[in-house]
Image (cartoon, rainbow, N blue to C red):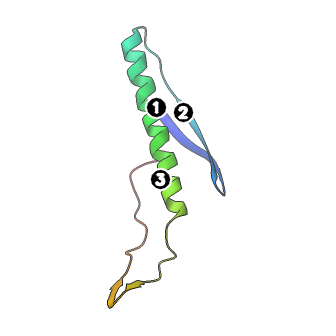
Amino acid sequence: MDAKNIKTESNRITIQVSIELDKEMLASEEAIQRGVNEAKLLATQYALSQYDTDGTPIKVKNTKYTSKGQHKTGIK
């Protein structure tokens, strides 16, 4: 199973999913679900990155909040 981010343009993402089907329907359905979940994860990560700040501190009343920056995940 493999989900890949093929292309991103502004607010559009193209994801390719490869799913190996089984001879048994239940196993095929589970493989499809895993593939859809991987694609959903990639799309959600990209959507969240659209709302990420530029790294400047955010000040609320007298409290300053800072970011440690973006962290790498183990996701392809």
Which badge, 2 or 3, is on the more N-terminal residue? 2
**How far apart are labels 2 and 3 at the CA level?**
16 Å
**Type of the residue with mark 3:** Gln
Placement of 35 over or under 46, stated as above or below? above
Q: Residue furthest top?
A: 23
**Type of the residue with mark 2:** Val
**How far apart are labels 2 and 1 at the CA level?**
6 Å
Q: Residue furthest right?
A: 9
Q: Percent position (x, y) of residue 70? A: 43, 67
Residue under the point 47% across and 53% down:
45
Placement of 49 over or under 24, stated as above or below? below
Task: Describe residue 15's horizontal placement relative to residue 9 as left or right.
Answer: left
Q: Percent position (x, y) of residue 34? A: 41, 31
Q: Nearer the viewer, residue 47 or 27?
A: 47
Which badge, 3 or 1, is on the more N-terminal residue? 1
Residue under the point 48% across and 21% down:
20
SS at badge 3: helix
Q: Quadrant of residue 64?
A: bottom left
10 Å crowding of disc 2: few (<14), some (14-19), many (20+): some
10 Å crowding of disc 3: few (<14), some (14-19), many (20+): few
Which badge, 2 or 1, is on the more N-terminal residue? 2
Residue 17 circle label: 2
